Amino acid sequence: MKARGKWFPILLSATVFPGAGQWYVGRRLRGGLMIGLTLLLTLAGVARFLSVVFALANKQGVRRPPELNPFPLLAQAWKIDYQVLLAFLLAIAALWILSILDLTFAPKEGKPS
């Protein structure tokens, strides 16, 4: 690694995005998979939550665009589907931790480009 030392890729994965540190040290496939999986889990979680919100809005006859205070509807959607959303968040957190541990304990291969 360059003068930045071994901590820069770890901090990159810890603070910017899971897989960013792997990408930086030259493990493009592993970093790309972690980045892609994190994006996929994030988009799937948001899509799932919004589908519940829109289903509730249609069921309650909320007019479009909705009123200025959407929080009661969002809170109701959270009560209905919080377990699935927590599963998405836990999977993303696990990827984040895996990314950090991988950079900490894996043998160093590849170079930054």
Image (spheres, helix red, strand yellow):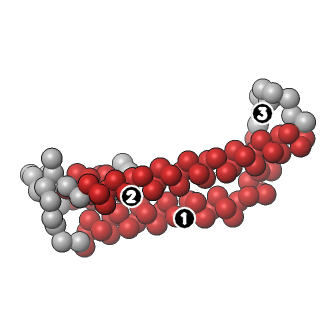
Q: Which mark is residue 34?
A: 2
In contact (CB < 8 Å): disc 1 and disc 2? no
Of the residues shown, which amino acid type is indicated by label 1? Leu
Tell us which disc is closer to us: 3 or 1.
1
Q: Nearer the viewer, residue 44 or 94?
A: 44
x and y percentages locating residue 72 in the rendered image: 80, 43
Amino acid type at image mark 2: Met
Please report the residue visible at 38 percent of the width from the left and 58 percent of the height from the top. Answer: 34
Foreground: disc 3 or disc 2: 2
Residue 15 vs residue 54, the one in the foreground: 54
Q: Which residue is mark 3?
A: 69
Residue corresponding to mark 1: 90
Inspect the image, locate mark 3, and give the three-letter code of the amino acid beneath it.
Asn
In the image, taking residue 60 as reference, residue 102 lies left or right, namely left
Q: Identify the residue at image location x=80%, y=50%.
A: 76
Q: Nearer the viewer, mark 1 or mark 2?
A: 2
Q: What numbered label is drawn on residue 42?
A: none
How crowded pointer 2 is (Cα within 10 Å; few <14, some 14-19, many 20+) is rated as many
